[in-house]
């Protein structure tokens, strides 16, 4: 049946032709052509190690081309010299200058990549759930009781390839896409066998890269199964920031909104987990229109999350502005993440103590409606660990932490202490204030041993990615 679209063509709004840019063609971008040759070369050097991807919407609407040295959206989008340590940068620069062939460049790139912790906390065989009959479900992860992560196989790519994201090894082909799943029947079966699961989180990559009819296969299967335990479906996405036409004027945008509406009408809460790294991403008419469409038409709720990133948003004023803008657009601030120990962490990473100060200073100047946000939070092997602040215990300074999610649910919401260290950027850089181990470590070891694997895993900590 022909769908009435007049309502959704939105006057002045229409989808431009989508054009993606990567290392192979970034020099075709007119604004790039005008940049100094040396800068273009640096982008090429770094782009050979960390892949990157963007599109015409980002290039034409989000970047301030008059100020590329400082512009957060430019820095977020294109490779930066500082993302590589000098020895790695020089090695690749030399190889390119010497005109080594593709294969040789690839070999050098892979050697360097292996020094950048491409598999933080052992991503591969982890928290892989099993059906009662023993079938392993590789496209899923079940780390916290209530929530299962699902990685639809057609949603394994992204609008961008962020070098602070744990997914970057996938994008360079160092890691299989073995998370991917297209087995809806198995997903449904798993949810039947696990009545404790209330939430399913579609993540990737970016599940909204999928065409609506593919996404519909998954969602319809869940709706048709009428699972009494399933209360919420979440979809992690960067599409609002990087291609808002997805919800307004793309060919199947109307069907997408209808699909969202159908989920909401079935008494399952649909939550769009949107990644916004900077207020600039909330500034265009088309993103506002996309938000209005989702909120008015579908009953879905949009929640927001982002890592705190040096050079991009390591400033309380930026976060306060971002949360306020989000609230005024009807979005619910949800998480501030800490970037994990992989890829370009040395470039984007912010020390934990500093991250918490930024969080606190921003939180203090927004109204209660924006204080739904929690963070800064590390998605680490034992769980999601929030930095609550610095306290004095007698005369000794200590960092106060707590679990927001834990491998053992009883760890959650119990403050614990670490020795003050204003340089630490991840939980493994912290030491307990007293004793040798944090209170959870022995038990964590047991849990991991029981899983018969060496280390833990977490995959929703991206831009947010689950994102
Ligand atoms: C964050 C996360 C979830 C969801 O946790 P909520 O606190 O419910 O948002 C689920 N699984 C993993 C692995 C996560 O990192
Ligand atoms: S941070 Fe988000 S947009 Fe960037 S690569 Fe990871 S999942 Fe994709």
Image: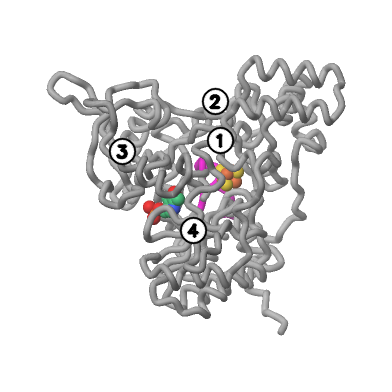
Contact (Cβ within 8 Å) of mark 3 with mark 1: no
Report the Cα–Cα distance between label 2 and label 1.
9 Å
User: Please, what secondary structure does the residue beneath circle 3 have?
Assistant: helix
Q: Which residue is mark 1?
A: 164
Q: Which residue is mark 3?
A: 442
Mark 2 / mark 1, whichever is N-terminal? 1
User: Please, what secondary structure does the residue beneath circle 2 have?
Assistant: helix
Where on the image, by quarter, is ligand 2?
top right
User: Please, what secondary structure does the residue beneath circle 1 have?
Assistant: loop
Mark 2 / mark 4, whichever is N-terminal? 4
The label nearer to you, 2 versus 4, is: 4
The percent position of residue 295, horizontal first and vertical second, equals 48, 65
Mark 3 / mark 2, whichever is N-terminal? 2
Provide the residue span drawn in magenta: 274-287
Q: Which residue is mark 4?
A: 129
Q: Which residue is mark 2?
A: 347
Report the Cα–Cα distance between label 3 and label 1.
30 Å
Q: Is residue 197 above or below residue 58?
A: below
Contact (Cβ within 8 Å) of mark 2 with mark 1: yes
* Residue labelled 1 has its Cβ within 8 Å of some atom of ligand 2: yes
Magenta stretch: includes residue 281: yes
Q: Residue at x 81, y 38 (%)?
A: 25
Q: Which image quadrant is residue 257 in?
A: bottom right
Crowding around mark 2 (Cα neighbors within 10 Å: few <14, some 14 to 19, many 20+) is some
Taking 44 as reference, is 373 left or right? left
Q: Is residue 334 above or below residue 222?
A: above
Mark 3 / mark 1, whichever is N-terminal? 1
Q: Which image quadrant is residue 377 in?
A: top left
The label nearer to you, 1 versus 4, is: 4
């Amino acid at each position: 049946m022909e769908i009435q679209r007049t309502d959704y063509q939105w006057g002045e709004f229409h989808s431009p032709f989508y054009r993606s840019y990567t290392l192979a063609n970034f020099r075709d971008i007119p604004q790039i052509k005008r940049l100094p040759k040396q800068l273009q070369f640096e982008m090429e050097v770094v782009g050979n190690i960390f892949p990157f991807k963007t599109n015409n919407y980002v290039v034409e609407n989000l970047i301030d081309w008059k100020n590329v040295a400082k512009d957060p959206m430019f820095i977020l989008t294109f490779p930066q010299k500082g993302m590589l340590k000098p020895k790695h940068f020089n090695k690749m620069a030399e190889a390119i200058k010497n005109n080594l062939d593709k294969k040789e460049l690839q070999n050098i790139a892979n050697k360097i990549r292996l020094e950048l912790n491409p598999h933080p906390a052992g991503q591969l065989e982890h928290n892989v759930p099993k059906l009662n009959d023993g079938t392993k479900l590789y496209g899923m992860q079940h780390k916290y009781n209530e929530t299962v992560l699902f990685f639809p196989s057609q949603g394994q790519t992204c609008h961008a390839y962020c070098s602070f994201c744990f997914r970057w090894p996938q994008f360079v082909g160092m890691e299989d896409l073995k998370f991917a799943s297209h087995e809806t029947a198995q997903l449904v079966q798993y949810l039947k066998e696990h009545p404790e699961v209330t939430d399913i989180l579609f993540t990737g990559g970016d599940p909204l890269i999928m065409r609506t009819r593919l996404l519909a296969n998954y969602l319809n299967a869940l709706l048709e199964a009428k699972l009494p335990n399933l209360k919420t479906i979440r979809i992690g996405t960067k599409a609002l920031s990087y291609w808002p036409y997805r919800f307004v004027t793309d060919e199947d945008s109307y069907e997408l909104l209808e699909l969202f509406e159908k989920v909401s009408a079935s008494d399952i809460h649909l939550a769009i987990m949107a990644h916004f790294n900077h207020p600039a991403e909330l500034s265009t008419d088309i993103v506002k229109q996309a938000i209005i469409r989702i909120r008015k038409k579908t009953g879905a709720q949009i929640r927001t999350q982002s890592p705190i990133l040096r050079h991009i948003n390591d400033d309380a004023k930026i976060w306060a502005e971002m949360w306020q803008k989000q609230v005024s657009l009807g979005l619910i601030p949800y998480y501030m993440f800490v970037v994990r120990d992989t890829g370009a962490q040395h470039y984007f990473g912010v020390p934990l103590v500093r991250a918490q100060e930024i969080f606190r200073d921003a939180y203090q100047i927004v109204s209660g409606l924006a204080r739904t946000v929690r963070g800064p939070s590390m998605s680490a092997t034992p769980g999601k660990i929030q930095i609550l602040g610095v306290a004095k215990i007698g005369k000794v300074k200590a960092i106060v932490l707590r679990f927001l999610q834990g491998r053992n649910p009883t760890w959650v919401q119990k403050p614990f202490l670490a020795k003050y260290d204003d340089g630490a950027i991840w939980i493994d850089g912290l030491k307990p204030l007293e004793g040798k181990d944090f209170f959870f470590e022995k038990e964590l070891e047991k849990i991991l041993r029981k899983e018969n694997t060496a280390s833990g895993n977490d995959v929703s900590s991206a831009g947010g990615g689950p994102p």
